[in-house]
Image (cartoon, grey):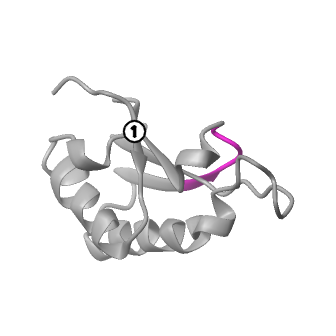
Amino acid sequence: MPPYQKHIFICTNERPTGHPRGCCQEKGSLKIRELFKEEVKRRGLQGKVRANAAGCLDACELGPTVVVYPEGVWYRVQTPEDVKEIMDQHIEGGTIVQRLAIYPVSP
């Protein structure tokens, strides 16, 4: 089986309540992960695109944090609409969603 064309890592890190940096899990990352998995399946991209839970990506204060490889683009994903936009534009269209990018990204 060839490697995936795209790999989506969704931070599901959990820190103690009240931690100054927060955690992606308390910000809804488990639901975001499920939405990405559903979109991959709905679009028939299994085997080409993989959506995985990730441990701490060390950016929980910005989260929920998602990283798409091989490009290495970091996103803040908060809503189902954000998930669909990344799937439409980045995963299927090859265009980085600048409004959701955490760090400056060159097109």
The residue that disc 1 covers is 102
Q: Quadrant of the N terminus?
A: top left
Compared to residue 80, the image places residue 40 above or below, namely: above
The magenta segment: 52-57
Direction right: furthest residue: 16
Residue at the spot x=34%, y=71% of the render? Answer: 39
Count of numbered labels shown in the rendering: 1
Q: Nearer the viewer, residue 48 or 82?
A: 82
- Residue 15 forms part of the magenta stretch: no
Q: Quadrant of residue 96?
A: top left
**Which amino acid type corresponds to the residue marked 1 in the rendered image?**
Ile
Q: Quadrant of residue 57?
A: top right
Residue at the spot x=38%, y=71% of the render? Answer: 79
Residue at the spot x=60%, y=66% of the render? Answer: 27
In the picture, measured across the screen, residue 81 lies left or right of residue 17, that is left
Q: Secondary structure at mark 1?
A: loop
Q: Quadrant of the C terminus?
A: top left
Where residue 15 sits: x, y (%)? 81, 55
Q: Nearer the viewer, residue 70 or 99?
A: 99
Where residue 2 sits: x, y (%)? 40, 38
Residue at the spot x=18%, y=60% of the render? Answer: 88
In the picture, measured across the screen, residue 99 lies left or right of residue 53, that is left
In the picture, measured across the screen, residue 70 lies left or right of residue 21, that is left
In the picture, measured across the screen, residue 82 lies left or right of residue 64, that is left
Check disc 1: other Cα within 10 Å, few if <14, some if 14-19, many if 20+. some
Compared to residue 97, the image places residue 35 above or below, namely: below
